[in-house]
Image: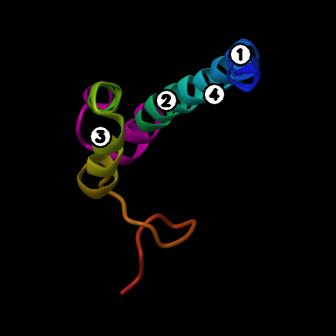
Amino acid sequence: MPSTIALQSGGGGAVLLIWLVFMVLFLAMVVWTYSDAKQNSSHPAFLWAIVVFLAPLLGIVLYVLLGRDQQGGGPGGRGTV
């Protein structure tokens, strides 16, 4: 079983790197939600940041679908119809 021992001894750095990448992405989602909600939402930005912090994937989807007041449409903010 030398292959098992080799995988166990060399995998710590890779696991740490993956964990760090996920933590950076997680914190970036919270910070982006807070800063975007300050500009584009009539709801308190810190509440959206808390929602994304507690439930990251569900929170970001809910914020994009329900929390943003402005809809896309280019540099002007709102789409033209």
Magenta region, residue range: 34-47
Q: Are marks 4 and 2 in contact (CB under 8 Å)?
A: no
Depth check, mark 1 against mark 2: the one in front is 1
Query: From the viewer's perspective, is 55 left or right of 23?
Result: left
Relative image position of residue 81 (x, y in whole percent): 36, 87
Q: Which mark is residue 5?
A: 1
Q: Say which amino acid is labelled 2.
A: Phe
- Category of crowding for the residue at label 1, using alpha-carbon neighbours closer than 10 angstroms: few (below 14), some (14–19), many (at least 20): few
Q: CA distance from mark 4 to mark 1?
A: 21 Å
Relative image position of residue 27 (x, y in whole percent): 51, 25
Q: Say which amino acid is labelled 4.
A: Ile
Relative image position of residue 72 (x, y in whole percent): 45, 67
Residue at horizontal 37 percent and vertical 39 percent from the top: 37
- Category of crowding for the residue at label 3, using alpha-carbon neighbours closer than 10 angstroms: few (below 14), some (14–19), many (at least 20): many
Write down the quadrant of residue 60 in the picture.
top left
Depth check, mark 3 against mark 1: the one in front is 1
Q: Which mark is residue 59?
A: 3
Q: Say which amino acid is labelled 3.
A: Gly
- Category of crowding for the residue at label 2, using alpha-carbon neighbours closer than 10 angstroms: few (below 14), some (14–19), many (at least 20): some
Name the residue beneath numbered marker 2. Answer: 26
Q: Which mark is residue 18?
A: 4
Depth check, mark 4 against mark 1: the one in front is 1
The tag earlier along the polypeptide, 1 or 2, is 1
Depth check, mark 4 against mark 3: the one in front is 4
Q: Are marks 4 and 1 in contact (CB under 8 Å)?
A: no
- Using the image as rendered, state which of residue 52 and residue 76 is in the foreground: 52
Magenta stretch prevailing secondary structure: helix
Query: From the viewer's perspective, is 40 left or right of 48?
Result: right
Q: What secondary structure is found at the residue carrying circle 2?
A: helix
- Category of crowding for the residue at label 4, using alpha-carbon neighbours closer than 10 angstroms: few (below 14), some (14–19), many (at least 20): few
